[in-house]
């Protein structure tokens, strides 16, 4: 299977987070926190040997590699991302594993340049929430599906982050992430309305599931802390906080992470899927 056009993407929504090798550790942690439910659902919808699949907004390729292992050498997986830095990491890892049936394409979610009606499964995770036109990206992903193919989208509800006992630092972290989304014209609580977007684009019977990891100890407790601090330049640029305020917030959040009496619920992941 080939792409329609292998040239780079022209106009995509810019990354707000660190990319490439510098951002790879956070993305590995993302999969540690949220990956089990992703893999379970992709198995549940039938992803298996010989199938053709796409991971849109694949980042450094963590899920795309897992999909490639699942479909095996008789199948094919494409990872699509707008960031050359992300794709450089993804290609290196794929080559290390010898996955010749896994290919990466430099394109955006609005125009993947992949063949229409060619894939059994199309997947994205925490992508639509970063886009100013999520409906347009959904239409693109639906177009890639074969008849009876499955679209699976995992997206986020940042507003669901909470701590117990309550923490002003965690509340500030959550509110800053929501606010920088508003400033950028995107919705970091999109997960809650994702099922409606499916219906609006003609997928009339979407299934919905929630996954909200909770930690009192461990690195997973710090995932959204790391995410918000990576977004620091965008937060400062939007006038939402100063560098001094973010440094103080980082210290307060580090103290939360070390306090084993404090539970932090990570942002709820909303999983929505439907057949074409």
Image: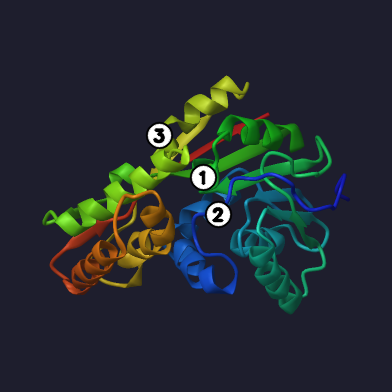
Q: Earlier in the sequence, mark 2 or mark 3?
A: 2
Asked whether residue 188 appears in the rendered view, the answer is no
- Image quadrant assignment for residue 109: top right
Q: Residue at x 37, y 56 (%)?
A: 236
Instruction: Give the vertical position of 199 relative to 217 (above or below).
Output: above
How far is disc 2 from disc 3 in space, using C-alphas? 22 Å
Q: Is residue 40 left or right of residue 150?
A: left
Instruction: Give the vertical position of 242 relative to 126 (above or below).
Output: below
Q: Is residue 101 left or right of residue 211?
A: right
Task: In the rendered structure, find residue 31 and report the number of the disc placed on it.
Answer: none
- Image quadrant assignment for residue 253: bottom left
Instruction: Say which element carries label 3.
Output: helix
Q: Residue at x 84, y 52 (%)?
A: 7
Asked if the residue under mark 2 is in contact with the one under mark 1, i.e. CB atoms within 8 Å, the reply is: yes
Q: Give residue 179's position: percent from left, percent from top.
A: 34, 44
Instruction: Say which element carries label 1.
Output: helix
Residue denoted by label 1: 130
How far is disc 1 from disc 3 in space, using C-alphas? 14 Å
Q: Earlier in the sequence, mark 1 or mark 2?
A: 2
Neighbourhood count class around disc 2 (C-alpha, 10 Å): few under 14, some 14–19, many 20 upward: few
Task: In the rendered structure, find residue 192 and report the number of the disc placed on it.
Answer: 3
Residue denoted by label 2: 15
């Amino acid at each position: 299977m080939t792409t329609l056009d292998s040239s780079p993407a022209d106009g995509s929504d810019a990354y707000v987070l660190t990319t490439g090798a510098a951002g790879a550790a956070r993305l590995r942690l993302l999969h540690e926190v949220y990956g089990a439910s992703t893999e379970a659902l992709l198995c549940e919808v039938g992803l298996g040997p010989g199938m053709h699949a796409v991971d849109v907004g694949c980042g450094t390729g963590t899920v795309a590699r897992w999909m490639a292992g699942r479909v095996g050498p008789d199948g094919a997986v494409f990872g699509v991302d707008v960031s050359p830095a992300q794709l450089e990491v993804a290609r290196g890892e794929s080559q290390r594993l010898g996955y010749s049936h896994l290919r990466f394409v430099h394109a955006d979610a609005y125009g993947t340049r992949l063949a229409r009606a060619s894939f059994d499964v199309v997947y994205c995770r925490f992508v639509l929430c970063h886009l100013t036109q999520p409906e347009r990206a959904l239409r693109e992903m639906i177009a890639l599906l074969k008849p009876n193919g499955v679209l699976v989208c995992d997206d986020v509800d940042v507003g669901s982050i909470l701590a117990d006992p309550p923490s002003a630092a965690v509340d500030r972290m959550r509110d800053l992430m929501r606010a920088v989304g508003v400033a950028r014209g995107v919705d970091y609580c999109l997960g809650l309305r994702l099922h409606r977007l499916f219906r609006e684009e003609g997928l009339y019977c979407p299934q919905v599931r929630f996954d909200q990891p909770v930690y009192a100890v461990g690195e997973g407790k710090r995932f959204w802390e790391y995410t918000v601090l990576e977004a620091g330049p965008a937060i400062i640029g939007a006038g939402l906080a100063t560098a001094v305020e973010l440094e103080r917030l980082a210290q307060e959040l580090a103290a939360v992470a070390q306090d084993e009496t404090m539970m932090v619920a990570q942002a709820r992941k909303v999983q929505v899927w439907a057949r074409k």
